[in-house]
Image (tube, rainbow, N blue to C red):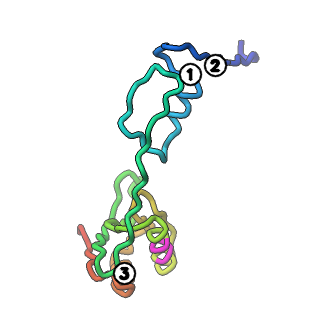
């Protein structure tokens, strides 16, 4: 039993009027991470195509109108501190560019995820000074 590997094969079936989706349809729905379904409707028609929402990309506000919050975060990071910058309104490319600038000025690593910039370590004071030098006048330090 230990040396024998079992294979599972799925058979592609299309039955008109069947309440079950085909395997391809299930995989298509499951792995649509970037496309958002608009008004999901169950259909027994195998040729039914779902409608998707248009992706809305906000334009980047000028630096003096951005309201950025700089805080220290330790949650779900095994006690390690990270400087978290959020509140940026704009395109993902501009956010990545700002994150790259902050990481290089602080000399540490980090990432840009979900509209937030993570800088490894406690660099709140330095980040606030860098952002104010870059023209982000409404930058606030939040928390202790």
N-terminal label among 3 and 2: 2
Contact check, label 2 and label 1, Cβ < 8 Å:
yes
The percent position of residue 120, horizontal first and vertical second, equals 45, 67
The residue to which callout 2 is attached is: 12
14 over 142 or under it: above or below: above
Residue under the image location 42 percent in, 65 percent down = 118
Quadrant of the drawing holding the C terminus = bottom left
**Which segment is the magenta one?**
97-101
Q: Is residue 132 above or below residue 22?
A: below
- Residue in view at x 42 percent, y 51 percent: 54
Kindly report the distance in space between the C-alpha atoms of the residues bearing marks 3 and 2: 56 Å
Q: Residue under circle 1? A: 22
* Residue at the limit of the structure toward the bottom, as seen here: 133
Q: How many marks?
A: 3
Please tell me how crowded label 2 is: few (under 14), some (14-19), or many (20+) other residues with Cα within 10 Å. Answer: few
Tag shown at residue 30: none
Mark 1 lies on a secondary structure that is loop
Image quadrant of residue 124? bottom left
Estimate the spatial distance between the alpha carbons at disc 1 and disc 3, rounded to whole Å. 52 Å
Q: Is residue 84 magenta?
A: no
Disc 3 or disc 2, which is closer to the eye?
2
Q: Badge 3 is on which residue?
A: 131
């Amino acid at each position: 039993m230990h040396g024998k590997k079992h294979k599972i094969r799925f058979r592609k079936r299309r039955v008109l009027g069947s309440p079950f989706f085909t395997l391809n349809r299930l995989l298509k729905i499951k792995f649509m991470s970037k496309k958002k379904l608009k008004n999901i409707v169950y259909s027994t028609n195998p040729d039914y195509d779902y409608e998707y929402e248009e992706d809305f990309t906000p334009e980047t506000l000028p630096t003096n109108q951005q309201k950025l919050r700089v805080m220290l975060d330790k949650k779900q990071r095994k006690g390690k501190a990270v400087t978290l910058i959020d509140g940026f309104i704009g395109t993902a490319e501009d956010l990545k560019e700002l994150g790259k600038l902050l990481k290089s000025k602080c000399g540490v690593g980090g990432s840009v995820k979900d509209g937030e910039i993570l800088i490894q370590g406690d660099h709140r004071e330095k980040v606030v000074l860098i952002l104010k030098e870059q023209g982000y006048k409404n930058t606030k330090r939040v928390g202790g």
